[in-house]
Amino acid sequence: MADALISLDGVEKVFDVRRRVGLMRREKRQVRAVDGISFEVARGEVVGYIGPNGAGKSTTIKMLTGILTPSGGRLRVAGIDPARERLRLAHRIGVVFGQRTTLWWDLPLKDSYGLMRRMYRIPAARYAQNLERCVDRLDLAELLDVPVRQLSLGQRMRGDIAAALLHDPDVLYLDEPTIGLDVVSKAKVRGFLRQLNRELGTTVLLTTHDLQDIEQLCERVMVIDHGRLMYDGRLDGLHAAGPAGESERTLVVDLERESEPIRVPGARVVRVEGPRQWLAFPAGASAAPLVAAVAARYPLVDLSVREPDIEDVIARMYAGRG
Ligand SMILES: Nc1ncnc2c1ncn2[C@@H]1O[C@H](COP(=O)(O)OP(=O)(O)OP(=O)(O)O)[C@@H](O)[C@H]1O
């Protein structure tokens, strides 16, 4: 990739773990948290990095920030080896951990930002401009004088995102940025990130368990499991990556009244709740003949088609390859 901002080549991270077995004995064991991962991210991309608990996502992000040193392989961010030049890298990246704040708990938001300004030696004009943009777009004006500990989770998250952007990073790492937020706050955060990428071309690497984050923000996803890359490509391609023929869509049918499970060719009933029934059919097949068949034989009130759930598809992908 000519314009790769992030590149990993066979990156590994092995942890030595000591475990007590019985009363006296200790057992030494190695955990391969990241097991030979290679990928590149171009400037301006928004990439989702997803996988089940313990897959190795946080370990990868920690290596990309220089917090952890890889056990093997080669890694570069903006041309910098993160573990060797962590401080230089800090000026080029922004990091937001959903579960943890980088702000000073007892200080008003604006004082935290002032400290960031000094830490990163941000020139006054640039600082003023970046702060104004974040305050405006993230709705922070009313919150600047409030100590961080008094902010709600959604407000605190917006405050954290602003803090990560004051020094104009090329790359933003987001680890679960919408975890625990209500629907309105999630929408605000996602909207801001889309705008940030569109207007400033900031490259984003996003770790999340919320598949709506991925659907609304990322054109490309990488799926990691047991420290290995299982999939790297477009989101819609994930469906095709599942075991052949298993990806399904669902026809949700509302009948006039409760009835026996619907019987039509090419679909099977997977759930019944009162007058509502769910019929699964192959994702590649057209819904039209199915809808016609149901409408011809059953008294209908309403119909809708549900696309395959990405979480299901990923689960199936793991099951198929595991
Ligand atoms: N400091 C450490 N010492 C020992 N083992 C670790 C350490 N950090 C992570 N691991 C192990 O490495 C593996 C990958 O963990 P990691 O936190 O990267 O997963 P994750 O994909 O971020 O999971 P989650 O979605 O739960 O945050 C797990 O088996 C974990 O127990």
Image: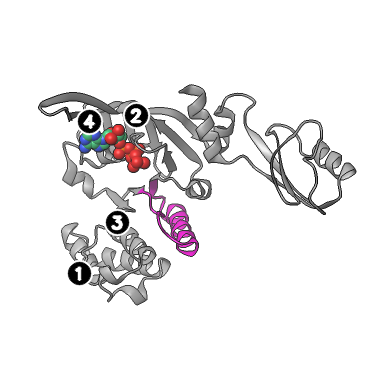
Q: Which of marks 4 and 1 is in front?
A: 1
User: Of the residues under marks 2 and 4, which one precedes in the sequence?
Assistant: 4
The disc, 1 or 3, on the residue closer to the chain's N-terminal end is: 1
Amino acid type indicated by mark 2: Gly
Amino acid carrying label 1: it is Asp
Question: Which residues make up the magenta segment?
Answer: 175-204
Q: Is mark 2 on a helix, strand or loop?
A: loop
- Of the numbered discs 4 and 1, the one sitting upstream in the chain is 4
Instruction: Give the percent coordinates (x, y) of residue 225.
Output: 40, 30
Residue at image mark 3: 164
Nearer to us of marks 1 and 3 is 1
> How many C-alpha atoms fall within 10 Å of the one at disc 1: few (<14), some, or many (≥20)?
few
| Image coords of residue 126 (percent x, y) | 28, 63
**What is the magenta segment's predominant secondary structure?**
helix
Given contact means CB atoms under 8 Å apart, are the residues at marks 1 and 3 in contact? no
Query: Residue 227 shows which numbered tag?
Result: 2
Q: Marks 3/2: CA distance?
A: 27 Å
Residue 82 visible in image: no
The residue at the point 55 percent across, 34 percent down is: 313
Query: Which residue has dot 1 on it?
Result: 106
Q: In which quarter of the image is residue 27?
A: top left
Q: Choose top left, top right, bottom left or bottom right for residue 185.
A: bottom left
Please state which of the two labelled residues, at mark 4 or mark 3, is closer to the viewer: 4
Give the image quadrant in which the ligand numbered 1 is located: top left
